[in-house]
Amino acid sequence: MNESYVECLIKRKSSLLNSLLKVIMIVFVVIVLLGGLLFGNMIVLIIAIAIGIGAYYVYPMFDIEYEYLYLDREISIDKIMAKQRRKRVATYDVGKMEILAPENSHELDPYRSRNIKVIDYSSNMDDHKKYLMAYHDETSECLVKFEPNEEMIKCIKQIAPRKVKEY
């Protein structure tokens, strides 16, 4: 049996909005906490603690990494939040892939003109080479944006050589 295994880990760049939300969240918790302590109001203090606990669970969602895993004709994408929690977000069968090409390739123009939903699993860094995969199964059709490494591209090309475009 010819099984290939490749994994690739990509850290998502934090946007300016995410950084701003982190700061606003921390400042808001501190202000409510200080207000509760200064005025001696227990209800405000309890609300501040509840908001702080909520912020503790929301905060890791701003630190995201994606792990791409290619194993036996299947691409799995996991989302890792704050290097603590892992969640499988998608699994794609290479047999149902229509095309895999660099983001700026003209091979993808027919898919862009149809206004297909784009699912972004990339790092959002301009200097990284991103690929778009046109995927169609029984229930949906989408373009998947991700950043596979050269080894993963090579393995996918061995399975579906006519569907992979490299430039």
Image (tube, rainbow, N blue to C red):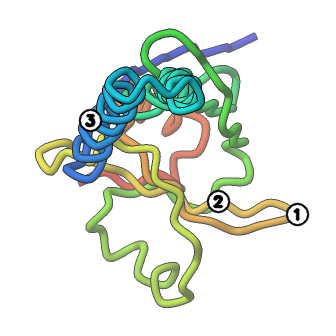
Residue 149: quadrant of the picture: top left
Q: Earlier in the sequence, mark 1 or mark 3?
A: 3
Placement of 105 over or under 3, stated as above or below: below
Placement of 82 over or under 113, stated as above or below: above
Task: Provide residue 37's location: percent of width, then percent of height.
Answer: 37, 21
User: Dot 3 lies on which element?
Assistant: helix
Q: Amino acid at mark 1?
A: Glu
Q: Which residue is mark 2?
A: 135
Is any part of residue 101 visible from this angle? yes
Q: Amino acid at mark 3?
A: Val
Task: Provide residue 15's location: percent of width, then percent of height.
Answer: 24, 48
- Local packing at callout 1 (Cα closer than 10 Å; few below 14, some 14-19, many 20+) is few
- Local packing at callout 3 (Cα closer than 10 Å; few below 14, some 14-19, many 20+) is few
**Are the residues tagged 1 and 3 within 8 Å (C-beta)?**
no
- Local packing at callout 2 (Cα closer than 10 Å; few below 14, some 14-19, many 20+) is some
Specify the farthest residue to the bottom: 113
* Separation (CA) of disc 2 from disc 3: 43 Å
Q: Which residue is mark 1?
A: 138
Which residue is painted at 37% across and 27% down in the image? 63
Which residue is painted at 58% across and 15% down in the image? 85
Q: Quadrant of the C terminus?
A: bottom left
Q: Nearer the viewer, residue 51 or 61?
A: 51
Q: Is residue 146 left or right of residue 71?
A: left
Q: Which residue is mark 3?
A: 27
